[in-house]
């Protein structure tokens, strides 16, 4: 299903939360099938959508002219639209639907493949797709060792950056954040507390927490994403994130340094 088809199919799904969820699910099916942007065809990855309410207004579009968007989507500065799990080696390009930043990886095949991308569509949706947190499990049967600390910091940092890009384009709140981890069954999620701890293994192939609605662009992103991030940890057998307790995130200083 094309992106435009997914938008139209989600338009009449119900309220704004239902619309955001429907768009995410339809795009997820396309991505898992290997039909994502930039030839992304990874067998496992993380898919995040940021969906402003204005997406379904007839004829609505943000101005993505090459000169008006600077510096948020300048092809010479593609890291302004970060790819989850990679802050270097990012390339930027204009597409028929907006602007994208992507990371290539050579898997030993005849051509490079896309390891992850983020795409800002002309209607304000941000689609973030990445297999980079699972990097290293492409060959053989060994499960990936996922660094849960880095995953939380990168996810929080990327979502915050996407919100800043949308705020730059004067998008209106609320904004809906949807998240799915697919192809994750058997992977190891490691809190990194001790080298002697046995990382929990993710039991489900697909982890898809409920969407989160942000009332404004100044929201505490990690606090707002507490429930879906906890759901990822619970999928690996933990009671929740080991880094977020009673409204306090122990990685906050590391997150601030990474922005």
Image: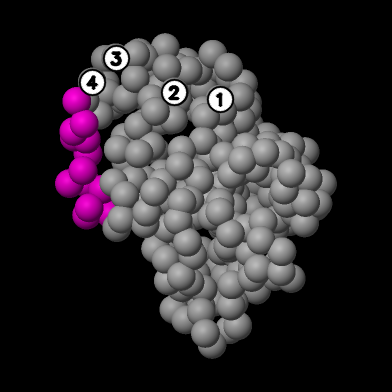
78 or 135: nearer the viewer? 78
Number of the front mark, 4 or 1: 1
Pointers 4 and 1 in contact (C-beta within 8 Å): no
Q: Which residue is mark 1?
A: 207
Pointers 1 and 2 in contact (C-beta within 8 Å): yes
Q: Which percent across, then down, holds residue 168?
A: 42, 71
Q: Which residue is mark 4?
A: 194
Q: Residues within 10 Å of mark 3 (few under 14, many from 20)?
A: few
Pointers 4 and 3 in contact (C-beta within 8 Å): yes
Residue at the spot 46% in from the left edge and 70% down from the top edge: 170
The C terminus sits in image quarter: bottom left
Q: Quadrant of residue 222?
A: top left
Q: Which percent across, then down, holds residue 46?
A: 55, 39
Residue 57 visible in this rendered orientation of the protein: yes
First along the sequence among labels 2 and 3: 3
Q: Secondary structure at mark 2?
A: helix
Q: Which percent across, then down, holds residue 244?
A: 25, 29
Residue at the spot 39% in from the left edge and 48% down from the top edge: 215
Residue interval drawn in magenta: 246-258
Q: Which residue is mark 2?
A: 231
Residue 134 visible in this rendered orientation of the protein: no
Q: Which residue is mark 3?
A: 197
CA separation in Å, label 4 and label 2: 22 Å
Residue at the spot 21% in from the left edge and 43% down from the top edge: 252
Number of the front mark, 1 or 3: 1
First along the sequence among labels 1 and 3: 3
Left or right of residue 211: residue 251: left
Q: Secondary structure at mark 3?
A: loop
First along the sequence among labels 4 and 2: 4
């Amino acid at each position: 299903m094309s992106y435009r088809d997914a938008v139209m199919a989600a338009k009449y799904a119900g309220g704004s939360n239902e619309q955001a969820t429907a768009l995410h699910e339809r795009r997820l099916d396309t991505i898992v099938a290997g039909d994502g942007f930039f030839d992304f065809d990874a067998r496992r990855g993380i898919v995040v959508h940021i969906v402003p309410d204005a997406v379904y207004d007839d004829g609505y579009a943000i101005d993505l002219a090459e000169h008006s968007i600077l510096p948020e989507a300048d092809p010479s500065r593609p890291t302004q639209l970060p790819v989850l799990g990679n802050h270097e080696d990012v390339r930027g390009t204009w597409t028929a639907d907006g602007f994208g930043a992507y990371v290539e990886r050579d898997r030993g095949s005849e051509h490079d493949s896309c390891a992850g991308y983020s795409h800002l569509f002309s209607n304000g949706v941000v689609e973030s797709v990445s297999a980079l947190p699972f990097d290293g499990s492409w060959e053989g049967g060994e499960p990936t060792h996922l660094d849960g600390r880095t995953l939380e910091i990168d996810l929080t940092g990327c979502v915050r950056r996407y919100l800043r890009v949308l705020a730059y384009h004067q998008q209106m709140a609320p904004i809906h954040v949807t998240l799915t981890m697919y192809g994750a069954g058997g992977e190891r999620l490691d809190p990194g507390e001790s080298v002697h701890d046995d990382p929990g293994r993710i039991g489900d192939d697909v982890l898809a927490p409920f969407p989160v609605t942000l009332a404004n662009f100044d929201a505490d992103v990690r606090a707002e994403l507490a429930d879906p991030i906890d759901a990822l940890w619970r999928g690996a057998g933990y009671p929740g994130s080991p880094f977020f307790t009673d409204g306090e995130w122990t990685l906050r200083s590391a997150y601030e340094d990474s922005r």
